[in-house]
Image: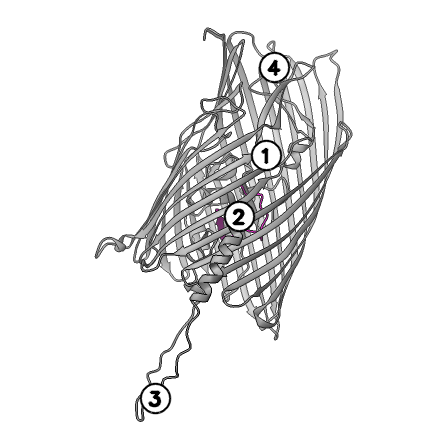
Amino acid sequence: MTVLAAAFATMACAQAQQAAPKQQEPVKQAAGEKVQQVEVKGSAQAYDPRRDDTASKIVVNNAEIVKYGDTNVLDVLKRLPGVTVSGGAVRMRGLGAGYTQFLVNGERPPSGFSLESLAPDSIERIEVMRAASAEFSTQSIAGTVNIVLKRVVSKASRELKAGAGLSRGLLSPSASLQLSDKAGAMSYTVSLAASRNRFEQDVRSIEENFDLARRRTMLRESSAHNVGVNEGINIGPRLSWTFANGDTLSWNSFANKHRFDMTSDRRTDTSEGQGVPLPDSNSRTAGDFEYARTDLNWVRKLGDSARIDIKGAATYSRNGSDIRRLAFNAQGDTALDSVTLTGADEIGYTTTGKYSTPIGDGHAFAMGWDGGYADRDDGKQRRETGLPGAFPINSDEDFAAEVTRFAVYGQDEWTITKHLSVYLGARWEGIRTTSSGNTFATTTSRTGVWSPLFHTLYKLPGMKGDQVRFSVTRTYKAPSTSALVPRRFTALNNSVTEPDYQGNPKLQPELALGIDASYEHYWGEGALLSASVSMRKIEGYTRRGLILDTDGRWVSLPVNDGDAHTRGIELEAKFPLKAVMKDAPNVDLRASLSRNWSTVDAVPGPNNRLDSQTPFSATLGIDYKAGALTAGASYAFKNGGPVRISENLGSYTSVRRDLEVYAVWKFNPAYQLRVAVSNVLGQDYINDSTYADSFGSSRSRTVYPGPTVARATLEVKF
């Protein structure tokens, strides 16, 4: 990396000297000659981060975010090129959960934060960064998705939205309010959003065991009837002052409350083999999540276009759950009556600072720090009784974790010529996690990662709109706090396909060396064709291990095991139909596809891919506008297939097809009606896992129904 950077810098200096312009003699005006005046106008809209930034970035504005009337930001993300959503986790390059970094306003949200609780109406833009930059954490092996909440005030505005969704006869209302205005040097923005989503579903599961001759030795079927509700409310106030010397001071806050409540009745029937000890159960699960954040941001302008940007923030989150469960044996007697109460409180403080200044012509140098401290207290109370004479369980677990994080970085983006720009950056980030509890010994984990970064953008001379990119990055994936803590979470009917879970305090971060290259062709307004390839070598790959403990229970835990390799190809096209057809209607088209491969060295083949990797995904979209009507559709396809997680464990991901349509009718500048239908095809969600050893094999398959949802929203500006 050092030799590469030095060689490139030397070449850049030579090109810059050769490209120095020669001084020209002033042009003399002839007597009586009329001088032609030329007016040059600049606009911030002329800057396109997708095209002009040296590091690859896609920016999705608010108009695209709210197009389909979503109440869940996950539904927005699944339509973005190169992004897939699976099980509530956002993924890039097909890599599983944890490899894609998720940020809110450039910072990592606290543990327990759910994307489902974030309303799209409160979002200003979404930034999808395919390669790491030094300014943000380099815990982004696959890439980074940064959600920027509404902050900018260009003019006074007031907007109210009220809508409702309908699915299987259940009504789910939602509403949002946006207010912004200016008063002299001060401006303010307030956003408020609330939603209530009701659901009812019948979940089906089947579990089979086979001997070595592939004869079935057990067949077990389960059905569960779930009824529940998701409720959430967001509020985001912002105040900003601009002083006479150009300095700015802003106060930004965001508060979120999310509630989940579900009742479930489950029955398990065993038609072949030995039955489970608790075939019937009913339960109620209630959960509350609260999150609040406030920060103060000061930007001080210095001479020669330099400036200092300092921000301090405080966060608070609380995540609690109440699980009440009754289970019955084969004779119908109450064999389990349990209550499990959990509560986690986390307080965090962060500080960031950035000094940026131009250095000569074309240099944009920046350096800064990023630090944080979080204190998490977690408690769990379990009260359990069984049949008469059985020994009751009364356990109280207390757990505390302290996470300290600090990073320093420097970066230089250099426009060497009008065709060539280079980005050089480096970041060191250290994390210390200390966890303690009354059921395990105190453990401390320390990690430190040095990340050099290199990006280049070359605009091909003589070929208007054609450019190539190349990046070399060092990134990593740090273990989550829950993955480090050796707490035990037990399963109701413990088996190889339904094991207990426990963290591993010896877990180390995964380190990745990445190479990215792409070719982009821009023609016409809004027209783009791009092709990109990527490779990652991951050291210390973390996979899901499975052990049988001394009590005869199966336990799943994360372990570091060798290296893994990934490769990928992404293609994207978007353009107005008028760019290829004369006198075409006002239609915009977009399409993307991603093909990904991976291998895990420690796992024998075939299908020894990274766990939950999406091998192939594609999106298609069309938008049409005619007078007061705007309409469109989006289709997302995601292929799965078999994955061998370890020598014994495997899983299968089914094909996923999502079709959505929308239409907006604008009655006048103040009123418009938006109608959308999601999951038009009624696609179900399927989980499939397998286990095989020298005695035979097991397979478990669960189908979660995916309902079709129709939603109508009235939008008013006043």
Residue position marked by numbered label 1 in the rendering: 261
Q: CA distance from mark 4 to mark 3?
A: 98 Å
The image shows residue 95, relative to residue 192, as above or below, that is above
Whole-percent x, y for residue 233 in the image: 58, 47
Residue 124 visible: no
- Dot 1 falls on a residue whose secondary structure is strand
Residue position marked by numbered label 4 in the rendering: 278
Nearer the observer, disc 2 or disc 1? 2
Residue position marked by numbered label 2 in the rendering: 132
- Dot 2 falls on a residue whose secondary structure is loop
| Outermost residue, bottom side | 31
Disc with the residue nearer the chain's start (4 vs 3): 3
Per the rendering, the mark at residue 29 is: 3
Disc with the residue nearer the chain's start (3 vs 1): 3
> Dominant secondary structure of the magenta stretch?
loop
Disc with the residue nearer the chain's start (4 vs 2): 2
Disc with the residue nearer the chain's start (4 vs 1): 1
The amino acid beneath tag 4 is Leu
Q: Nearer the viewer, residue 196 or 432?
A: 432
Q: Residue at x 53, y 49 (%)?
A: 3
Disc with the residue nearer the chain's start (3 vs 2): 3
Mark 2, residues whose alpha carbon is within 10 Å: few (<14), some, or many (≥20)?
many
The image shows residue 203, relative to residue 317, as above or below, that is above
Whole-percent x, y for residue 340 in the image: 69, 28
Model colouring: one colour
Magenta segment: 122-142
Mark 1, residues whose alpha carbon is within 10 Å: few (<14), some, or many (≥20)?
some
